[in-house]
Structures are given as structure tokens and as C-alpha cells.
Image (tube, rainbow, N blue to C red):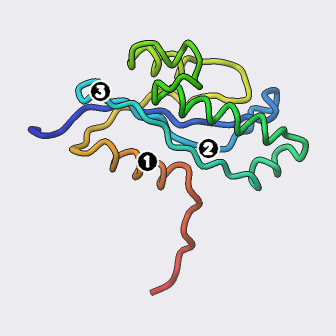
Amino acid sequence: MDGYDLYDYAIVRVVPRVEREEFVNAGVILSCQKSGYLQAAIALPEARLLALDPDVDLDMIHRHLGSIVAICAGHPAGGPIAQLPMRARFHWLTAKRSSVIQMSPVHTGLSTHTDDALKRIMARMVLPLAPNVPV
């Protein structure tokens, strides 16, 4: 499997009412230790989120999701967590918690291009599904 890099990823979930355990997928965090890659892609489906909880604080959700992107990038806006080593940031972000922003279990994959893997996972797990069109 020359040319393939092992990566880990988790799906970012928004759980507007934790006690109900209902969630929408809102992004992906992907980490490849070999290449030093750690990136998050976010696409919040606001209409689906509002269907679960019409009173959800969208501004707060957007701020928290933005902090995930900043932490992955090591940007100062991510606070002290963003200054940790890459794998420590990934493990901190994917730690199990009972809050409005949660992560799926961590999954593993192989790819020759981690950016493409991130796009593929986003399309499959987060972005709206394309309608089936009869041929």
C-alpha cells in the first residue's frame, strides 16, 4: 500500500437538546499523523437543527463550530488548546462529552490525498444528499 497514508476522522455532531440525544451531522475532523495534517470542515444544516429545536442558539453553535476549525488550524482564536501538539488537539476535540457539540467515535481510513478524503467524508456524511434522479 505504498503512497497511502493512514488517517483518523470523526464526525462533528450538534445535539441541540442533549437530554433527547437527537443530533445533526455538521462537520468532519480529519487527522493524519504521518503528514502532520489536522483539519476540520464544517457545514451546519440550520433548517434540520431548527427542526429538532426551534429555540436553539444558532450564534452560539456557529461560534463553537468555528472554534473547532481554529483549534485544528492551531490558530490563536482557538485558545490554549490550539497551541497543543497536533495529535493532542485531535484527541481533545474527539474526547467523549455530553454537550451541544459532540463527536462520533473515531474512525480510520487510508488515502493518498487527505484533502480529498476530507471532502469525500463531508459529502457522504454531512452535506445534503442529492436526490435520486431516474435515468
x and y percent of residue 7 in the render?
31, 32
Direction from residue 49 to residue 79 in the image, left or right: left
Identify the residue at horizontal 56%, vertical 63% (top origin).
129
Image quadrant of residue 103?
top right
Q: Is residue 30 above or below residue 97?
A: below
Direction from residue 37 to residue 40 in the image, left or right: right
Between 131 and 114, the one lying in front of the other is: 114
Q: Is residue 127 above or below residue 117?
A: below
Q: Is residue 73 above or below residue 118?
A: above
Residue 12 makes an appearance in the image: yes
x and y percent of residue 122 in the render?
48, 49
Element type at mark 1: helix
Q: Which residue is mark 2?
A: 26
Is the residue under label 3 in contact with that under label 2 (CB below 8 Å)?
Answer: no
How far apart marks 1 and 2 lie (CA) works out to: 12 Å
Identify the residue at horizontal 54%, vertical 69% (top origin).
130
Direction from residue 25 to residue 34 in the image, left or right: left
Q: Is residue 75 above or below residue 4?
A: above
Identify the residue at horizontal 44%, vertical 87% (top origin).
135
How far apart marks 1 and 3 lie (CA) works out to: 19 Å
Identify the residue at horizontal 77%, vertical 34% (top origin).
60
Q: Which residue is mark 1?
A: 121
Extreme-bottom residue of the structure: 135
